Image (cartoon, grey):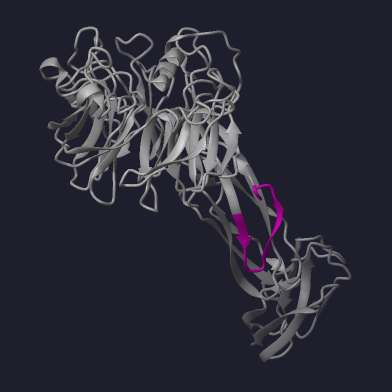
Amino acid sequence: MERFGLLKRVCFLFLFCVATTIASPTQTFTTLHSFGYTDGAYPFTSRLIQATDGNLYGTTTYGGTSSNGAACSVGCGTVFKITPAGTLTSLYSFCSRTNCTDGSDPYAGLIQATDGNFYGTTYSGGANSNSTYCPAGCGTVFKITTAGTLTTLYSFCSQANCADGYAPGAGLVQATDGNFYGTAGQGGAYGSGTVFEITATGRLTTLHSFDSTDGAYPEGLIQATDRNFYGTAGQGGAYGWGTVFEITPEGTLATLYSFTIDAAYPAGLIQAIDGNFYGTTEGEGGIWGWGTVFEITPEGTLTTLHGFDLTDGGNPLGGLIQATDGNFYGTTAVGGAHRNRTWCGDGCGTVFEITPEGTLTTLYSFCSRTNCTDGSSPLAGLVQATDGNFYGTTFHGGASGPCSGGCGTIFTFGPPAVTLSHTSFRFANQALTETSAAKTVTLKNSGTAVLTMSGITINGNFAISANTCAEAALTMDEKCSVSVTFTPTVLGKQTGTLTFTDNAANSPQTLSLSGTGVEPATLTPASASYGAQGVATTSAAKTFTLTNNQTVTLTSIAITITGDFAVSATTCSTSLGAKGKCTISVTFTPTATGSRTGQLSVSDSASNSPQTSSLKGTGQ
């Protein structure tokens, strides 16, 4: 008997039907690698992991350099390493040993254990087979080093009637006790799958056999903060549509929730920072539904956060991750803005972001490039690496390869990032207590994921006069703006900072602000010395500038001068426009020998009237 979830997935991949093309925001990302058969093909539900060396590791279900007749005629699967820059190395091809005793068809991904090695499962192959249940081999648990040396730790169906389970379609988890825990999708005492524990040396203990009433065809496990394990079963339970269960390390199982037809066939779980669990269902409204995202408490209270409607994606098989911004990210196998009638008639899949409150944004629709060179049908979930970027795989598509429809891809896209149009604003001299004209900074989301603002603050004698960024949620390349004014309260240079706080990796972003507070009107220079000048002779003129620093017109201007000094020319009239300037030319004609002094004075409507400059010279 084939596990239902896998049959369903194959159906989605190889059946096609007519669907309308739906528009969605275009997002860009990078295709790091297109598989070409010999280096792997068709990465199934294998989520990538980032290892301690900084590289990414994963499996492909098919492809590689070994095959086994009809069982895996297109290659029996691989383990690979890929650098964040996109250099791929094939570490191992399954079925390299006679009769595939090393396993074949690794559906799930890897984990890196505390010993530095990787551990995983294969769906088929191994030392044991059963003509009724698993004629091509019943699956394995394996260990592989970073250099590619593989050791088969356990071959399933080692017990009569496969009481130890077979067809492990999910990966492993290393628990706090150092041992590994996982599920076999079928077999066990009742045929509906098992939960098992296995040591690093390969000693396997069956902890629980599902009997359909408590679930059937289990997916993977997680160990929660309470040290118990939580997981989902793809079918079974009170209504037959799958369950969420808890199981202790000793094997005591409790069913937390039984799904109904309205949200059916759950994929795996994660535990979020709030302590609750989040996951996805493959279908909603029966076998041809499009799936949901749900939250469930440790006590079993379930809330549906989102139901997919195909336009925003469908059948989220790969589950969720919670990113550093607190939001959840995942993929859908079908739906989205683009389709290919041969390979993805219901849409070629999406990448999405969803908040803990249930607001979903489609970040990318696959097959947006000619011939689906960007990939299609992502069946696995995502991983966020230490560089902040997200990485994932698609089952189909890609740039080249002998596989019909493409052998699949590895892709990456970035988290939200902020680019500011300016890094600083310097305001012109500004009259005390008056507000300057505004300067505007534009904020752009230069990443791929949705940018959400959590705070905008400003300090000093600066203020926000307009703001389109408050509570903004910006998709890639979207912009918002903030306008800032300066109102000095004291004389001299003043500084401040405009700060944006958001979910970008480079948060917070800051804009430095500066300006100088000045009197409403100024006369410069404040003093002038004419030097020695012959009695009764006139010096060359010196020029003084009257500046109106206000945003209103300066009126009632009158110029007076004292001593042996005279105004020889002026551009000033009785009024001066806002931010305007005019000049006054002054000469020195000494009437006697010795030191001579005087004053240029301008009276006007400014609050600091009159403005004065001291004058001196020497008669000889």
Q: How many marks?
A: 0
Q: In this view, does 559 lie to the left or right of 202?
A: right
Residue located 39% across and 53% down the image? 225
In the image, residue 457 lies in the stretch drawn in magenta:
yes
Residue 92 location, quadrant: top left
Give the vertical position of 80 relative to 561 (above or below). above
Is any atom of residue 547 visible in this view?
A: yes
Give the vertical position of 618 relative to 116 (above or below). below
Pinpoint residue 371: horizontal percent, then vertical percent.
43, 12
Is any atom of residue 351 visible in this view?
A: no
Q: Which of 44 and 392 is in front in this view?
A: 44
Give the vertical position of 280 relative to 105 (above or below). below
Locate the N terminus by quadrant. Answer: top left
Residue located 56% across and 50% down the image? 422
User: Residue placed farthest to the left in the image?
Assistant: 98
Q: Which of 396 and 525 is in front in this view?
A: 396
Q: Is residue 458 left or right of residue 152?
A: right
Q: Nearer the viewer, residue 332 or 283?
A: 283
Pinpoint residue 260: horizontal percent, then vertical percent.
56, 29
Q: Is residue 271 left or right of residue 59?
A: right
Locate the C terminus by quadrant. Answer: bottom right
Q: Is residue 116 left or right of residue 218?
A: left
Residue 180 location, quadrant: top left
Residue 46 location, quadrant: top left
Residue located 76% across and 61% down the image? 580
Pinpoint residue 110: horizontal percent, then vertical percent.
27, 35
Region rendered in magenta: 455-471
In the image, residue 424 lies in the stretch drawn in magenta:
no
Pinpoint residue 154: horizontal percent, then vertical percent.
17, 31
Residue located 53% across and 53% down the image? 423
